[in-house]
Structure formats: structure tokens, C-alpha cells
Image (cartoon, rainbow, N blue to C red):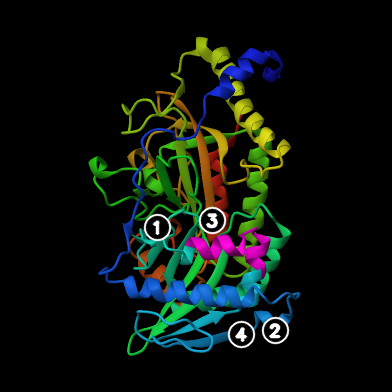
Amino acid sequence: MIYRDLDRDGIRQFRRGSCCFNGAEVKKPGETISKGHKNYDLMLNLQLGIRYSVGKHAQIRRDLKPSDFDPKEKFWTRFPPEGSKITPPHQSVEFRWKDYCPVVFRHLREHFQVDTADYMLAICGNDALRELSSPGKSGSFIYLTQDDRFMIKTVKKSEVKVLIRMLPSYYQHVCRYEKSLVTKFFGVHCVKPIGGQKTRFIVMGNLFCSEYRIHRRFDLKGSSHGRTTDKPEGEIDETTTLKDLDLNFMFRLQRNWYQELIKQINRDCEFLEAERIMDYSLLVGLHFRDDSTCDKMGLSPFILRSGNKDSYQNEKFMRGCRFLEAELQDRDRILSGRKSLIRLGANMPARAERMARRSDFDQYTLGGISHLTPSRSGEIYEVVLYFGIIDILQDYDISKKLEHAYKSLQADPTSISAVDPKHYSKRFRDFLGRIFVEER
């Protein structure tokens, strides 16, 4: 084992160099919602509503009952500008606020170790939210808290129905599998201003809340039809969400992490398949650990190997040191009584092997996407990975069946996103089994 060859001075040397982004502060993505913004009133409404409902249900200390999951378990509250016996005065127009299954979501927040005071402060404190345009086709808006911990996404009525329908199974699944990669949901709400339209939204965890700078992000479905960014290469930056045909990396994980990942992907996909869910994605974020230069890709990768066979032993030694560095730093945290930072899907040390872009050479096969072909450069970068399964609120309803029928006339039926949940799950797992590989 390579770790045995390290002396203490070598370990200290590698541990001194932090792998966090410590350069100039990076401008956070999104537009701060200040007074005069078109959605300023909406932000005030949801902050008032969440402060009220979370504070109210924080006082309810009891076990969950089957009735808490009932789709009819939703409550309307009126918020007049002058205030009422139960609501504070505010500067917005009168609105109504709806909570869905609030006791269930209080238990979920506890399970995900979200402190009630932190939750309310992040969303409802003095800091304004930031608005992002959704990269998807849904037209949804995404709001981020200033600390990046929580995301608030506007959703359709059908998506709320799907979440409430599968809520008992979802609760059971995430409680049974603590390493589940599916989206962490913290609340479902609705705002209805007097004379205005209903806006439904969900509160969830932000996968990319980290001290690390996310240099590249990919939204991966395992399908190929239309799965490329619409941005010219010169306009692609760290905020661009790339897709399947833009992928130009294969990710090498240490054996225990690889085995844990495949096991959990299978569990999560079985759950989603049983709930008739499809069209979900694996959202992947990469942090390149050396941030000293920006020569390649507009980024700063630390290249471990350049294809020279003579450098193999040096490469293996460096790789072992880097993995050990991350594990030792995390072990120090645990021994000092703090929570582990490295976990499945977050802060994971890995190696990214540069590949040819799939759109440059891909041949569609019966499975939808062919095996990745390594590029000749053999470049390998040390990265920190973040990933999770997102967009899990689309069931295979009549609209998706019609989409499948229509697109099948234009493209290979196996290459499109809209396929039945069983096919979708198998294709998704097969694809991830090719882009994540065990380190040898």
C-alpha cells in the first residue's frame, strides 16, 4: 500500500496546502432581489410565510402519524398588511399562504440535521435572496439564500402533486438510506396575492454549497438527443450547466467510494422507478484542486499525468498522497468532534480523466449512448466532486407519453429523455456505471 511509504514530514507537507478556494472572493451567481425587483414582493411573502409556518410547527413535538402525510393536510393562512392575531404587519399587498404537510417536513429537516433557527435566519433574515434563471425548459425560477445553503424553486401544480403523493415513500427512503443522493426537500408552500396568481415552490438543499469553487457543472441524464448546451464554446464559464454530449471527463474514485456510489445509485433508482418517476438528472460539480493558472478551459487544473509511462510510479505516489491528505484532514475534524466533510456526493476527492467530447465522436447505440473513448492526451486532474440526483418530480404522465411518441418520429427512441421509468432507470444506471470507474 502506497500510504506506508509516507513519512511524517511528507504528510505535513501535503496537509499544509489547503484544497479550498482561497483566492479573491468569487462573485456569487444570480441577481440579488432588492426593492424595485419584479419579484421583490414575492420574496417578502415567502419569507414572511416561512418564518410563520416554521416557527409555528417548531413547537409541535410529537411522532409522525399517517394522517400527517394526507394530501389534504394543507393549511391556508391570511396575511393582511396590517397584521392579525397570528401574523405580523408587513409592507406588501395582502396575500394567502399555504403549507403542505408541515409536520412531515419539520421531521425531514430534523432528519437532515437542519437547525430550525439557522433555517429561518438563512431564508427569512435581513439578507435578500438571489434569483437564478432555471437552466431547464420548465421556466421555473430558482432562488438562493446568501449563504448558499438553501434553494427555493418555483414548481408546477403537477410537481407538487407528485411530491405529496410520493412523500410517505420518500420519507421512508431517505430515513432508511442516509447516503441517498436524491434531492433533500425541506418544505412545500404556495403564495397567493390578492388579485394575483398562485406561486408554488419547494425549499431544498443546494448541492453546491461549499468552500470550494465549482469550476465545471454537468446535468447528466444518460440520454443523447438534444443533450448539449446551446452556448458557444467561448461563452461557457463556471456558471454554465453542461449536458451529456458536452461531457469530456471520466471520474476515477477510490474503491470504497466507488462501491458505495454504485450501491446507492441502484437504491435511489429503484425507489424512483417504483414511484414511476423519470426525466431526473445527476447534477455533478467539479472543483479543480490547483487554482494557480487559468491556461486550460479557462480554469486551473492540476495535471497528474501527461501520458508518459515513466511517470506512472510518481503519479501513483502523488495520487496516494492527495487522497490521504483529504482523508487525514477529515479525520482531524471527526476527532475534534466536528462533522465529517467528506461524504457520498460532497467533498469527494477523485481524479478526472480528460476524454474526447462525446458529441465529437459518439455513435448512438441501442442503449442510447456508446462507451466513452479516452482522448490521446491521457490528462488526469485532481478534483473534488459534488453530485446528487435532481428533478425527481416528473412522473410518466400522458404528456410525457405523447412527447415520447412525437420525438420517436424524429430521433432514435432510445436516445430521447422521455422514456418509461423502467427504461429510464436502466439507461441512467448504465451510463453512470461508465463515467464513474474504480481507481486501479
Circle 2 SS class: helix
Decide which of 4, 45 is in the foreground and name it.
45
Q: Is disc 4 in contact with disc 3, using a CB cutoff of under 8 Å?
A: no
As measured in the structure, the alpha-carbon distance from the residue carrying label 2 to the one carrying label 1 is: 45 Å
Residue 313 occupies quadrant:
top right
Label 1: few (<14), some (14–19) or many (≥20) C-alpha neighbours in 10 Å: some
Disc 2: which residue: 67
Disc 3: which residue: 389
Amino acid type at image mark 4: Glu
First to last magenta residue range: 107-122
Circle 4 SS class: loop
As measured in the structure, the alpha-carbon distance from the residue carrying label 2 to the one carrying label 3 is: 28 Å
Q: Earlier in the sequence, mark 3 or mark 1?
A: 3
Label 4: few (<14), some (14–19) or many (≥20) C-alpha neighbours in 10 Å: some
Q: Nearer the viewer, mark 2 or mark 3?
A: 2
Q: Nearer the viewer, mark 4 or mark 3?
A: 4
Residue 397 in view (yes/no): no
What is the number of the mark on residue 73?
4
